[in-house]
Amino acid sequence: MPSKERKTVQGSERDPLPGARVTRPADPNEQIEVTVRVRRRADSKDDIASLIETHSAQPHERHHLSHEEFEKTYGADPKDIEQIEKFAKEHNLTVVESSLPRRSVILSGKVADMSDAFGVSLATYEHPGGKYRGRTGSIHVPAEIHHIIEGVFGLDNRPQATPFFRHFKPKENTATPTQSPPISYTPLQLAKLYDFPDGDGAGQCIAMIELGGGYRSADLNAYFSQLDIHAPKITAVSVDHCHNSPIGDPVSIDGEVMMDIEVAAAIVPKASIVVYFAPNTSRGFVDSITKAIHDTQHKPTILSISWGGPENTWSRQAMITIDNALQSAAALGITITCAAGDHGFGDGVADGHAHVNFPASSPHLLACGGTKLVGSGAKIQSEVVWNDGPGHGATGGGISDVFAVPSYQSKSKIPSSINPGKRKGRGIPDVAGNADPATGYKVRVDGKEVVLGGTSAVAPLWAALVALINQKLQRNVGFINPELYNGSAGSHALHDITLGNNGGYSARAGWDACTGLGTPDGKAILSLLSSTTKSKAGKGKHDK
């Protein structure tokens, strides 16, 4: 018989959403699913973070693990999975799926049984944005499996993230959101302005996380035909029962999905694009990222993320789990690009303090900020920090309240936070690209030609650049932050943006909390990464 002693799952604490109130207890007979995330193998001799740190410091020695090597070294222990399955049976729960590399067990059962199993009280909450099933306080599990469990996701299904795309809105409010601004670009024009290397992305796979909305093949075919590009291969993958579900409104979150696909695929039309559709919950975010990273069928080489939320809206268990997954991606040679947010230095939190966005604040991905770019042909005429003022959007950026300064930023003179206490932490973004909807991207959404912007566009733009570089080098460059920070100053691989601010932080020479190291000079970045990968020849068999 299991003991009755229970222990708290560290970091699982939850408070209600602002303005939320309980309306009734959750239906005890409602069937729900949760994902239990378990620890890495207890017999792993190396810590994965140390592995990445060491190999990042010496790029020529980096060894990207194969999926098989990763599972054997850093996956879950089958015995731990068995213990979770036994626990599920004792509480009338059904095992839907288990995965050693994802270190996940998906359980299904009634609300009443889930509440008993995890020591929580679930209720229905109403808030200004709708309603959700939620809980307060911590999750509690039996003492005998406490040491195995790193997180439990799905008991609470509140909305977790926001997409970072923006329609052009004249400040006079005299035009519709779909009316074109004075300046706009196709993705191909921006690739030319940023001097991307030649290529088509053949052999590469770009994964995208989408938490709602969808795409229509007819729109994609029309868009790429207009650009005189053969339509790329697009695959939709369902996560946690969520599917490609276009809303049919060009002002809806379909704009996020379509822009992500069109920006990347226009530049690398022969790369495969795999879109992972998941619910907009912390569980959906965790499961979509781990599914993409450990997808041995499609084997993504790059993952683009255009969704996120302020650090203070996430549970600590979710942030730790996602950051661990991003470390796994680095070990596997997968590059992650992520939007830094569209709400300036406060990240949309109305408390007067500075905030940064997660997962962009994770030190194990490339956080992408935004600029306003004016160019003609292949020449950039001006480029400044994107800041259209209150209510119109500005690039996210600042200092993390959670993550420490990573070693690759140690020489970048990362400033202290402007918040009381002047915390020293991970600075975001790392890089930037055109994001102002007033100089936005020409895309097609739900049958209409529109112009969109936001840092959402910058993540797939950088993803496409990495795909071209991978293709040129015939290997995956993987986690490129150390190379960019250590080599960009001497090689001029990025355009340093020194004018503008995001409301709290100002641009300056070198790294800043608005545009990071700057915007890309694609061929110079290729040259920089070529010089750090020449001695890696012969190890490419581990990259696929």
Image: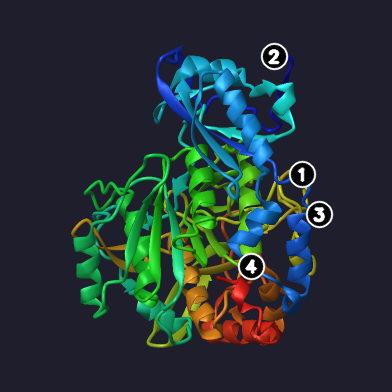
Give the labeled residue for mark 3.
45
Left or right? Give the position of 307 relative to 181. right
Left or right? Give the position of 470 relative to 265. right
Amino acid type assigned to the residue bearing label 4 in the image: Phe
Amino acid type assigned to the residue bearing label 3 in the image: Lys
Give the labeled residue for mark 1.
42
* Neighbourhood count class around disc 3 (C-alpha, 10 Å): few under 14, some 14–19, many 20 upward: few
Whether residue 12 is visible to the viewer of this picture, yes or no, is yes
Q: Using the image, determine if residue 240 lies above or below residue 398.
A: above
Amino acid type assigned to the residue bearing label 2 in the image: Met
Left or right? Give the position of 357 relative to 450. right
Measured Cα–Cα span from mark 2 to mark 1:
25 Å
Which residue is depicted at the point 41% across and 77% down? 190
Residue 25: x and y in percent read: 46, 12
Q: Foreground residue, 311 or 362?
A: 362
Foreground mark, 4 or 1, reads: 1
Q: Dot 4 lies on which element?
A: loop
Measured Cα–Cα span from mark 2 to mark 4:
47 Å
Foreground mark, 2 or 1, reads: 2
